[in-house]
Image (cartoon, rainbow, N blue to C red):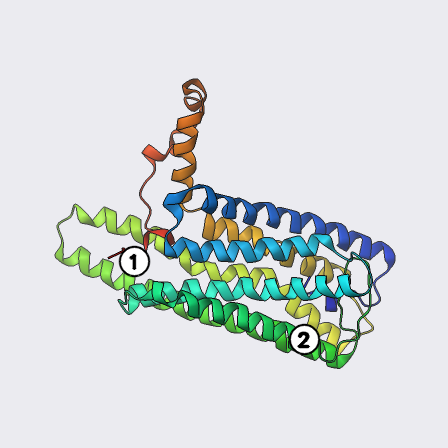
Amino acid sequence: MASSAAVAGVLSAHDRQILTAVNTGASSLSFVGSGFIVLCYVLFKELRKFSFKLVFYLALSDMLCSFFSIVGDPAKGFFCYAQGYSTHFFCVASFLWTTTIAFTLHRTVVRHKADVEELEAIFHLYVWGTSLVMTVIRSFGNDHRHFGIWCWTQTGRTGKAVHFVTFYTPLWGAILYNGLTYFQVIRMLNNATRMAVGISDRLYVPDARDNMKSLNRWGYYPLILIGSWAFGTINLIHDFIEPGHKIFWLSFLDVGMAALMGLFNSIAYGLNSSVRRAICERMDMFLPERVCRWLPNNFKYRNQQQENELVSLKIEDK
């Protein structure tokens, strides 16, 4: 995990075994959740719109980050370092992809630009390039040691400082950018809704309010990164100030919440109405009618509201 620097230290063997189990279990959940979104994108052609393509890249990064976290410490030497580099690279890529999603929404909704699809190559250069640079820089000042499942930990103050600069600084930059961006998007849509309520007939008002109810959920997206990495940030700062004193419960929350980031992203970004609708359509096609009859009405795509979610904000092909 990218948070391993702050949790290895002087913890007992029993504590490290517990953290190993927590990391493996939580990372497995994230691997399954993000892998499910990747599978949906591959199987369902109707989801292959530009907006959901960004969600696919996010899920792919989460899946690979979780995979290398599950692998743990395969061996000392080259394979261990490769695992450490890979985990850091894909974790950074994950939260950087969330900024491209926020940028796309802002450019489409606030600035009314229709050129976001042309920026895909720039997005790839930005995400993968920045992740690579941060990963390479992180190797400076490291004292490579092995603590249970963690291949790559920084035990010196210089290594911990480099870790903070190469991971937590861009992470909190992404959180700040996402928060400001979603605030602007939601504020503009709220203003548009109030104008629509004022000038349109009353039949339009419920639809506008339903749309705003789903759009307001975007304001919670930055909370995923905050919830996933707040304990890791606190733990690293505490470890930097008092390197000889470890707090087990803080390390527990650090490892567990960070490993669940992929699961949180897959639920928030991936399981939108379009994905659920695509799944339900296949269920109606392949499941016997008597089985479908037992499904809740609100689970069937015919009775679902057409939510105004991320995947619906796409640029139509000209």
The residue positioned farthest toward the right in the image shown: 13
What is the secondary structure assignment of the residue under circle 2?
helix
Residue drawn at x 53%, y 59% as measured from the top left: 224
Q: Quadrant of residue 83?
A: bottom right
Q: Earlier in the sequence, mark 1 or mark 2?
A: 2
Q: Nearer the viewer, residue 123 or 224?
A: 123
Work out whether residue 213 or residue 260 is closer to the camera in this orientation and state it: 260
| 256 left or right, relative to 92 | right
Left or right: 256 with respect to 173?
right
Residue drawn at (61%, 55%) of the image: 64
Real-space CA distance between mark 1 and mark 2, rounded to the nearest whole angstrom: 38 Å
- Please name the residue that numbered disc 1 is placed on: 315
| Mark 2 nearby-residue class (10 Å; few <14, some 14–19, many ≥20) | many
Please tell me which residue lies in front, 227 or 271.
271
**Residue shown at 35% from the left, 63% from the top:** 117
Quarter of the rendering containing residue 45:
top left
- The image shows residue 168 at horizontal and vertical percentages of 61, 72
Residue 63 in sight: yes
Q: Which type of secondary structure does the marked residue at label 1 adopt? A: loop
> Where residue 290 appears, x then y in whole percent?
43, 18
Q: Which residue is mark 2?
A: 138
From the top left corner, tell me how far across and down residue 285 is, in percent.
40, 27
Q: Quadrant of the N terminus?
A: bottom right
- Please provide percent x and percent y for residue 119: 38, 68
Q: Which mark is residue 248?
A: none
